[in-house]
Image (tube, rainbow, N blue to C red):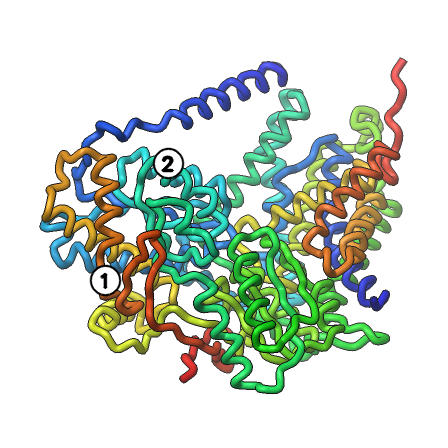
Amino acid sequence: MSVGRLLRLGTGLLTLSLLLAGCGSDDTNQPVDVTGGVPVGAVLALTGNANVYGQDQKIGLELALQQRNGSGGINGRPLKLALEDSGSDEPGANAAFTLQINRGVLALIGPTLSQQAFSADPIAQRRGVPVVAPSNTATGIPEIGFFISRVSAESSVIAPLAIERALKIQPGLKRAAVFYAQDDAYSTAETTIFQKALKEKGLEPVTVQRTQLNDQDFQNQISAALREKPDLIVLSLQAVDGGNLIRQLRELGYRGLIVAGNGMNTPNIYPICQKYCDGLLIAQAYSPELDTPANAAFLKAFKAAKGGAIPPQLTAQAYTALQVIGEALARLDKRQPLTGAPLAATRKQLMQELLAGTYATPLGEIRFTPEGEVIQSQFFVAQVRMDPGGRSGRFALLK
Amino acid sequence: MDLLQILVNGLSVGAVYGLFALGYTLVFSVLGVINFAHGAVFTLGAYFTYLLIGGAVGANGLLAGFQLPFALPFWGALPLAGLGAALVALLVERVAFRPLRRRRADPLLALITSLGAGVILVNLIQLLVGAESYAIPTGALGGLPASFPLLGARVRTVQALLLGIAVLLLALLTLWLEGSRNGKGLQAVAEDPETAQLLGIDSTAMVRLAFGLSGFLAGVAGGLVGLSVSIAGPYFGIGYGLKGLAVLVLGGLGSVPGAVLGGLIVGLAEAFVPADWSGYKDAVSYGFLFLVLLLRPRGLLGRPLPTKV
């Protein structure tokens, strides 16, 4: 076969597959299929540069599923969770959302990144499928539409807390250098909040350095920032790029305080910045020390699964997302049995049910605004403490 | 801005690009095609280095928790990782290139088979060791300091090593190509495989040699970059692969000095992007490539195509 014929055949197949992909199933008259359990989907970044978050979230979902099904599932029927890997980009998230929706799931959890959410959530909104975001913190996520909600509090609520804490530790701070990934929705949203908070606290940023999500070498930006002699570094980056930046920053001689945003709020930064992670300040939406029955149950399950380890925020939030959906489904099913009900109408009723509830979760008691924004009362600030070998550490909550 | 700091930053990154592009160049010069599996071989070099210095596999993948029963110092692990990567490159040649060559298939098809081999390798890495990030321990260089001052600039030790080792390897390769029988044989095959065969040069062996060398360089480059930054999962080599392609084209397809020059130019172009615009450094380097190709379509040191009559 000549190359030309091969190319023509390839183009034909591609066109056909695109046409088929565009033909989503018609949900309008389809009944809810509860064969094998009540179907819920999750779309997480299990590969690519955001995989470090997806791995944390996957554990949270697994534990929540065990907890739900161990206590009767959805009124005697098991909750069935279909997990799809989105990769770490928008096309991956779009494809995974479409696949899950076509499977007939009643609700979706995900995607991992805000950047992906701005691309994939409109698909769920158009198809009328409830979405609970476990980790999207950028401004404007619930505003995508009625079907979009989140259990991850917006950056504007949490991020300034770490700046306040840095000033408490070192009141004389004057010169802040800011880094953010300009091609990432979370980073750009969070840095705006950080920069506003800095100005409000009298800390004018002396330099703002832009990076890209897939960058690994930051020596140019660091050299430029260090020339400004900053005494505080503020990062809105994801775990891999942020971890690399911190390592290079410390290797190039910076000794001052570093505040990082939610993107670095995972123990998966430890192997990247290693001993240089020590001292990093990050605001938290979850405290393992929260003394509630819901958190005690979550902690017990996590420690049993992970050899006594302390759960990270992302795991707690993913757990919460599935818990919220499970409870809303159980309430809806009691009022109006799910079996055989029309899928499209059931999805809409589930969203209404979800927004109406109050939930006792590992994050504390949470509710939702009518727009789907989470209402959470307690937030914290942690400082990373690395073990002497620099290979593992912990997020030590600051009192 | 401190010129020396910019030069150091640019040259250390550019040296890696050059090393990477040399692998492309060696294969391109003998086969006339680009080996798209090269990025995956580079990635493997980084993982091999990590494992050889005693790194343990994380919680995901079939090899979860696996650790070699010995741990080598970085300087022992790096060449061994290069050799491991060379073996994988030879395997790629065996399964993705040789069958097509034997059937005298259109060389363009090798683009697809090498891409397939690359995707398979990347997925194999993910299957075996998971998708998480790994990092070579910060103390891997023993008692060497993390950075040192140099005429007012601050240089990370790993940056200096990257530059030094890359320059050393490039010099050795050039000496070998110009001064050894096999090196000249490789150049003869690159010039005209059929005439080289008639002159008694085993072109199949030369192709294997090109793949082996290319794999070794990729493996060493992967290990060095892995030392400088973390190994960000199985797709670690993709960004470098794209940049390597740009360098290959900029320097001139098939030109060894062109690959080196192209790498250094791209590295320096990125370093000279003003810090406030550093988020756009890729646009600047590819824009530069675009301009050079408009003015000089065969690249900086590429040879003009022969005129056919």
Instruction: Establish if A221 lies above or below B105.
Output: below
Tell me the quarter of the picture where residue A272 sits: bottom right
The 10 Å Cα crowd at callout 2, few under 14, some 14 to 19, many 20 or more, is few
Secondary structure under the numbered disc 2 in the rendered image: helix
The residue identified by callout 2 is A126
C-alpha gap between disc 1 and disc 2: 27 Å
Q: Hey, what amino acid is under mark 1?
A: Tyr
The mark found on residue A359 in the picture is 1
Where residue A101 sits in the image (x, y, percent)? 32, 37
Q: Position of residue A280 (x, y in %)?
A: 53, 75
Lateral position of residue A70 relative to residue B70, left or right: left
Answer whether residue B50 is visible to the viewer in this image: no
Q: Chain of mark 1?
A: A
Q: Are marks 1 and 2 in contact (CB under 8 Å)?
A: no
Name the side, left or right, on which B30 lies relative to A193: right
The chain that hosts pointer 2 is A
Instruction: Please provide percent x and percent y for residue B60.
Output: 40, 56
Left or right, B46 with respect to B168, comes to left
Picture coordinates of residue B86, whole percent (x, y): 64, 48
Helix, strand or loop at label 1? It is strand
Q: Report how many numbered discs are placed on residues in the image.
A: 2
